[in-house]
Image: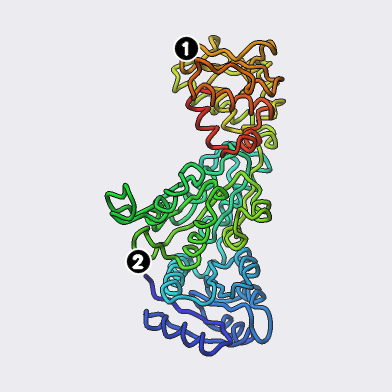
Amino acid sequence: MPTAKVLIVEDSASLALGYAAQLEDAGHEVSLCETLAEARRSLSGEAFDVVLLDLQLPDGDGLTLFDALTGSKGNPAVIVVTADGSLNRAIAAMRLGAYDFLVKPVSGVRLLSTVGNAAEQSNSAERSSGPREVSAPSQEDTFHGFIGHSPAMKTVFRTIESVADSKATVFVTGESGTGKEVTAEAIHSASKRRSGPFVAINCGAIPENLLESELFGHVKGAFTGAVENRIGAAKAADGGTLFLDEICEMDLKLQVKLLRFLQTGMIQRVGSSAAEPVNVRIVCATNRNPEREVAEGRFREDLYYRLNVIPIALPALRERGDDISLIARKLAERIAAEEGRAITGFTPASEVYLAQHSWPGNVRELQNTLRRAIITGSGDKLDLAGIGALTRRPVAPSAPPQFSTGEAATPTFPIADAQSAMTADFSGMTLDQIERLAIEQAIARHSGNIVKAARGLGVSPSTIYRKLERWGG
């Protein structure tokens, strides 16, 4: 861990001296200031690696010190120290460029870890160059796994580049299939953590009683089936990025433990009394409205504010204009190569379909539609007009659902008849076939909207997507 020159801006003498003692014991050089005026004079006269900044100061708001940083010597990383009641203002500081924030009371381990990491970032930058300039995304068609160059996506690309080297948590929102995990991977690959691990965990795909173990690990014998020690996703991502997908699916009790981990930087494996430090960048995502989840009591407000430091809202595919055609061509080329097909483009009707379809399943739906067209088509041009993702041909209302004996066959059912699943004769049908019928009907009732269908069935959208993929839908 590199030593650093640290400026502590804190009006409480006991706290300032406590921070200074711990930092000096670790080999850092420390200077103390009690007011904003003193801090500005220090920053204009000396070069610091790290500024430890309290927000409540006798002569003003600590946030105003960020204005002085542009004219300061060097390019110090700022760590904000705040009480719980000032959490919103700490988040505002992160958006102004703060490296991280600590919540009082600050543990010694957390203080030293955060200052050390901030110093490493500060020392690796060229001091004379000032704040890192963010270059505009390339005009090429790809960006860290994304395809497209629409104005909406250029905004996303610029945000990814500007926050990549920060340790601030990123909260990605967007409909299913818009590329939330691709966003997390892009942030990781554009950051200085790119050589470290990228670990993704789907909070909605793991049973609640196992999620804590998957996230934080467990020791042998902690519970039935724990036959060996497990480090967990957080420890596995040490030095890299941890992506928490479908974060709003997490149980409230586990949310408390996640919040504690974010505040302390320490994990505790299930069945262990020892805490371990972990250095990870957190990126989380949801296809729900997180503010509504907070308002309805399903997601902790304090955790939401802790996670929502850097928000990134992904546009739906239908909002991306010409990107749809560009993505379709690149995906079709890749899928055709996988399937051993030679294609030269799309039929005129397909071009119209690409532009006019609403794509409720976004890129995932587009990909499935293209694969279906490539597999079932025979010409050198793809015909998508009759393929539509997640659409089924209706039969007469009086006809019961029909299933072929093949497991991969697609059932047909009267879309207009919302009660057919309740009145159908299920004799001779397997539970898997009945489940498939219920899911297909829910999708049809909601015009192909997976999120609404999942909500109506009381399951996660990822559950439906997994089953559709298994069924070849």
Q: Position of residue 346 (x, y in %)?
A: 61, 18
Q: Dividing the image into 4 quarters, which one contains the N terminus? A: bottom left
Which residue is painted at 44% across and 69% down in the image? 123
Q: Residues within 10 Å of mark 1 (few under 14, many from 20)?
A: few
Instruction: Please say if 418 is above or below 44.
Output: above
SS category of the residue bearing label 2: loop
Distance from disc 2 to disc 1, alpha carbons, whole Å, reads 54 Å
Contact check, label 2 and label 1, Cβ < 8 Å: no
Q: Position of residue 9 (x, y in %)?
A: 56, 82
The correct choice, above or below, for 433 with respect to 259 in the image is above
Q: Crowding at label 2, few (<14), some or many (≥20) Cα neighbours within 10 Å?
A: few
Residue drawn 47% across and 16% down?
341
**Lateral position of residue 368 relative to residue 222, left or right:** right
Q: Earlier in the sequence, mark 2 or mark 1?
A: 2
**Whether residue 75 can be seen here:** no
Which numbered dot is residue 405? 1
Q: Is residue 406 visible?
A: yes
Q: Which residue is mark 2?
A: 273
The picture quadrant where one finds residue 39 is: bottom right
Depth check, front residue: 3 or 204: 204
The reply, left or right, for residue 380 in relation to residue 201 is right
Residue 229 in percent (x, y) is at 29, 53
Q: Residue at x 52, y 82 (%)?
A: 8
Q: In the image, residue 209 lies at what x, y percent?
A: 44, 49
Q: Nearer the viewer, residue 226 or 184?
A: 226
Nearest the eye: 389 or 464: 464
Three-letter amino acid code at the position of disc 1: Thr
Which color scheme does this rendered protein use?
rainbow
Residue type beneath disc 2: Ser
Q: SS class of the residue under badge 1?
A: loop
82 vs 225, left or right, is: right
Q: Residue at x 62, y 60 (%)?
A: 301
